[in-house]
Image (cartoon, rainbow, N blue to C red):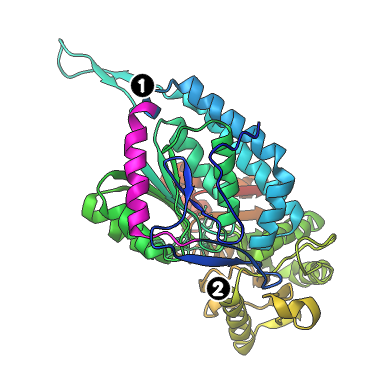
């Protein structure tokens, strides 16, 4: 289905604000350019929305809310199903667009479109399962009913590293629950977001239920969303630093907030692991999206007896990764998103080497030919990472795999947990008792002394969102 009735776009200077079902320019007329990180070429110029545009989008959402909340859940679900289908039909073109504006290799980009479609599909089903409860009352003549109501106007602020999936993960549940949503995609990847919004419109979404504010001024847009008082819930995925700012911003109007923030995942490889599998999986975990993934490992801990073997095997495979424009066949690692991203990777590598780490492969910014027009860093393996190096403390967000040897399980857990980040963790061993000791999880964390004794007083691995048991 490609009705496209509300599309009014032109290139360049695309009207990219979706307000009340119409694609419009910013009220100020301001625009900004979206560039291809692999080539430096401007892809499109889009609207640079500001506070006045946010207010218009909120007005439209407020007008749409009563009708959308009354739309029966099955109908809302059908619309989400149609959206999933349209995204799949358009996976090749949206994937190409994503590679052009974000840089990830084409296969990863089209895979992400499928991943985004899966969220629409999942929440299409969930729309019909918004159930309530009856709970016992303290009074004999009362019955307590718990019913779920759409909270009202919601907003989403999303990062550039998964420009379709992170949006889908927010839009789909909000719409399924009967809430309008206003989205503010990352400034560097608005085009993929516009393609997702187009799929929703073509699936039949009523005007005002989705608003899109593309902008180069995130703080202003966010200030308008939080300050208005009608936006009841904001869902944010992005860096921990910005997450802190949003916690502060939410206080004034007491806006509900969901945060998915940065990661610094540890990856433990014990000496009984299947090494071939461990090597392949560490590489897949670390180098997809050029290492710009919140759950990708940033600290690899390898038991000392196998560290040389592991390092040699991993380095041989990392040396074979093909870096370049993600549209080119065979490329497995694309550019970093921009010069700032590249500068952080360079700093981490420089700092680690200055403090004694050994560079086994890579270690430099790539130059010459196509590399001169983008931010390309050679896939890198560093051995001998210490706790005082920047890479051991901060999210690198680049194609750098740092290895730290360990002697015992207890040492490994202590190092793995010495971080404020708790997003994801990984472990490879054939010892299943150890796997479950490491895994811990909320219940194990509360199991107390007996469990702790197994771990020599250490806690199980910190993780919140993802833990992969690998044997
Ligand atoms: P970022 O925090 O810089 O930006 C995220 C979003 O916040 C963007 O839309 C940006 O425009 C906006 N933003 C920036 N400054 C803002 C401000 N002052 N007020 C309001 N909004 C503001 O993050 P990024 O560089 O786009 O993405 C990378 C980060 O996202 C990494 O830290 C990564 O780990 C994290 N991330 C986490 C998850 C997860 O599920 N936990 C998933 C993907 C990415």
Q: Which of 69 and 250 is in front in this view?
A: 69
Q: Can residue 248 be seen in this view?
A: yes
Does 358 sit above or below residue 179? below
Q: Is mark 1 within 8 Å of ligand 1?
A: no
Question: Residue 259 location, x and y as percent?
Answer: 42, 52
Residue at the (64%, 61%) spot, across then down? 101
- Compared to residue 259, the image places residue 263 above or below, namely below
Kindly give the residue lying farthest to the top in the view shown.
Answer: 141
- The tag on residue 132 is 1
Read off the magenta span. Answer: 47-67
Q: In which quarter of the image is residue 312?
A: bottom right
Q: Is residue 44 left or right of residue 109?
A: left
Q: Main secondary structure of the magenta part?
A: helix
Where does the image place residue 409, in percent across and percent down from the top left?
Answer: 60, 60
Q: Characterize the local packing of mark 1: few (<14), some (14-19) or many (20 or more) Cα atoms within 10 angstroms.
A: few
Question: Residue tagged by mark 2?
Answer: 392
Q: Which of marks 1 and 2 is in front?
A: 1
Q: In this view, does 376 lie to the left or right of 172?
A: right
Quadrant, the N terminus: top right
Residue 402 position, x and y percent, is 65, 72
Residue 162 appears in view: no
Instruction: State the residue at coordinates (80%, 80%).
Output: 369
């Amino acid at each position: 289905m490609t009705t496209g009735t509300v599309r009014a776009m032109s290139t360049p200077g695309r009207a990219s604000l979706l307000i009340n079902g119409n694609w419009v320019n910013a009220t100020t007329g301001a625009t900004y350019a979206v560039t291809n990180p692999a080539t430096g070429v401007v892809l499109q110029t889009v609207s640079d929305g500001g506070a006045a545009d946010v207010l218009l989008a909120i007005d439209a959402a407020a007008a749409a809310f009563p009708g959308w909340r009354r739309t029966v859940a099955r109908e809302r679900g059908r619309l989400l199903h149609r959206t999933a289908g349209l995204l799949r039909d358009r996976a090749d073109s949206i994937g190409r667009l994503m590679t052009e504006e974000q840089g990830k290799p084409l296969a990863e980009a089209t895979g992400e479109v499928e991943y985004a479609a899966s969220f629409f599909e999942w929440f299409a089903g969930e729309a019909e399962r918004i159930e309530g409860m009856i709970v016992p009352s303290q009074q004999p003549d009362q019955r307590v009913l718990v019913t779920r109501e759409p909270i009202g106007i919601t907003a989403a602020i999303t990062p550039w590293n998964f420009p379709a999936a992170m949006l889908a993960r927010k839009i789909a549940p909000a719409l399924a629950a009967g809430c309008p949503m206003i989205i503010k995609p990352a400034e560097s990847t608005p085009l993929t977001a516009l393609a997702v919004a187009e799929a929703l419109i073509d699936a039949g979404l009523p005007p005002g239920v989705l608003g899109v504010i593309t902008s180069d001024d995130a703080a202003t847009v966010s200030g308008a969303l939080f300050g208005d008082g009608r936006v009841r819930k904001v869902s944010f995925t992005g860096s921990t630093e910005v997450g802190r700012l949003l916690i502060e911003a939410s206080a004034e109007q007491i806006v509900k907030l969901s945060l998915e923030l940065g990661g610094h995942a540890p990856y433990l490889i014990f000496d009984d692991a299947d090494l071939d599998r461990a090597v392949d999986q560490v590489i897949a975990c670390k180098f997809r999206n050029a290492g710009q993934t919140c759950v990708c490992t940033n600290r690899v801990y390898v038991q000392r007896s196998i560290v040389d073997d592991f390092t040699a095997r991993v380095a041989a495979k990392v040396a074979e990764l093909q870096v370049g424009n993600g549209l080119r066949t065979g490329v497995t690692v694309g550019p970093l998103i921009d010069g700032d991203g590249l500068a952080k990777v360079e700093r981490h590598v420089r700092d680690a080497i200055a403090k004694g780490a050994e560079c086994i492969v890579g270690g430099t910014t790539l130059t010459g030919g196509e590399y001169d027009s983008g931010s390309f860093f050679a896939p890198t393996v560093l051995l001998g990472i210490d706790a005082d190096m920047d890479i051991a403390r901060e999210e690198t967000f680049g194609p750098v795999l740092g290895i730290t040897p360990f002697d015992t399980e207890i040492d490994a857990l202590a190092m793995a947990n010495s971080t404020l980040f708790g997003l994801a963790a990984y472990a490879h061993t054939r010892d299943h008792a150890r796997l479950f000791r490491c895994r811990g999880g909320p219940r194990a964390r509360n199991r107390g002394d007996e469990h702790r004794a197994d771990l020599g007083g250490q806690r199980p691995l910190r993780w919140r969102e993802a833990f992969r048991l690998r044997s």
